[in-house]
Amino acid sequence: MDQIVIRGGQRLKGRIPISGAKNAALTLLPCALLTDEPLTLRNLPRLADVDGFGHLLNQLGCSTTIEGSRPEDFGRVMTARTTTLTSTVAPYDIVRKMRASILVLGPLLARAGEATVSLPGGCAIGNRPIDLHLKALEAFGAEIELASGYVKAVAPGGRLAGGKFTFPVVSVGATENAVMAAVLAKGTCVLENAAREPEIVDLCNCLVAMGAHIDGIGTETLTIEGVDRLHGATYRVMADRIEAGSYACAAVITEGDVELVGAKAGEMEATLAALREAGATVEGTKSGIRVAMSGRAQPVTLSTAPYPGFATDMQAQFMAMATLGTGASLFTETIFENRYMHVPELARMGCDIQVKGRTAVVRGVDHLVGAPVMATDLRASMSLIIAGLAAQGQTEVNRVYHLDRGYERLEEKLQAVGADIERISAG
């Protein structure tokens, strides 16, 4: 199994290209199931999860072809076409590896009038039930049955009737599934208290480019007027705001100066505000965002919340950044109940972190010491990379397949700005 080896202490300086967003790509790919015409996605990141989702689409009858990157993009170009659905079953052996696979449920139901999807897997960061996905689909007219670890959904008469659903709590995945299910409904579907993440805006904009009728994009109320069919489109995946925030934390902990090329300040305002709270210089550039740091980070107080609040996907990276801060930082995790699994691994490097329930207090220490550590999930793995970049000595990060799910060419990007980092391949 591969590992990443870091010899810490190098100040990061230079330009880091930000790839297409993993969370957006995994939402846009299932849109190919909604039409028999080609959907071409540009700026698609080279990630294990993207490859895995492509394989799932192939299982359902969608053909995919991949080209190299274009000068204006960092990722690949994929054209996906589902001329005919050959299956409406997303099997356990694929879905268990990646939670985002549940996002084929809505498109299959919309296109074929039925779908059978295994209950999902993914990172072990706490309980993430799909009950809101199912309740939204039921509100639009679907009949749902759970049996033997699978969800079976049927639209009587072959198409959803339409309806209204109010989310009791904000859910990104459930909003995405419901929107994709609604675009081919017979009637009008309304979602209230919908998630507003930039990735959902990206999804809605792509669907509109395919001929969907969606009002309220970017707000908590989405009104989708069903259409008889969608057509093909060419669409560019948005830049990854979580990747950009992660490299910003790396710049701060190493007292560096980096330009995040392609990052959009308007999509990550809470992250940028937290970086400024920590004492970083944050400014827009013609190509993206510059983040620079002089001295150690100031204490921060952060609580995760749905967009536009501070993203749960940035919590671990900021925690790592705070370990070398000047005082005590306070973190409250409100989204997932088990998202502090990186804390014991950070402690192996000399961090002072105390966890009580959903709250963590991080007291800055004089220095970190490199150590063998093990990644437990995608964002936790990045927190170990960030800590390793500033630690004295050598850090060995194991289980890097978690990183490969969400960070494209990580070692190459960090090497280009001065990090002493390499991947050691097993065998």
Image: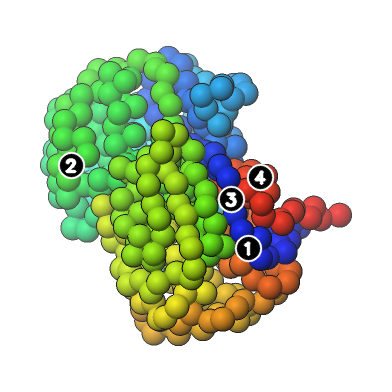
- Under circle 1, the secondary element is helix
Mark positioned earlier in the residue sequence (2 or 4): 2
- Under circle 3, the secondary element is strand
Q: Position of residue 155 (x, y in %)?
A: 27, 34
The residue closer to the viewer here, 235 or 317, is 317
| Residue 389 numbered tag | 1
According to the picture, the residue beneath numbered tag 2 turns out to be 219
Q: Are marks 3 and 1 in contact (CB under 8 Å)?
A: no
Is residue 135 rendered to the left or right of residue 256?
left
Is residue 283 rendered to the left or right of residue 394?
left
Mark whose residue sits in front, 2 or 1: 1
Q: Position of residue 286 (x, y in %)?
A: 41, 33
Mark positioned earlier in the residue sequence (3 or 2): 3
- Measure the C-alpha gap from mark 3 to mark 1: 13 Å
Mark positioned earlier in the residue sequence (3 or 1): 3
Question: Looking at numbered disc 3 in the image, what kind of residue is underneath it?
Answer: Lys
The residue closer to the viewer here, 228 or 65, is 65
Point 67% across, 55% down: residue: 419
Which residue appears farthest toward the front when viewing the image? 294
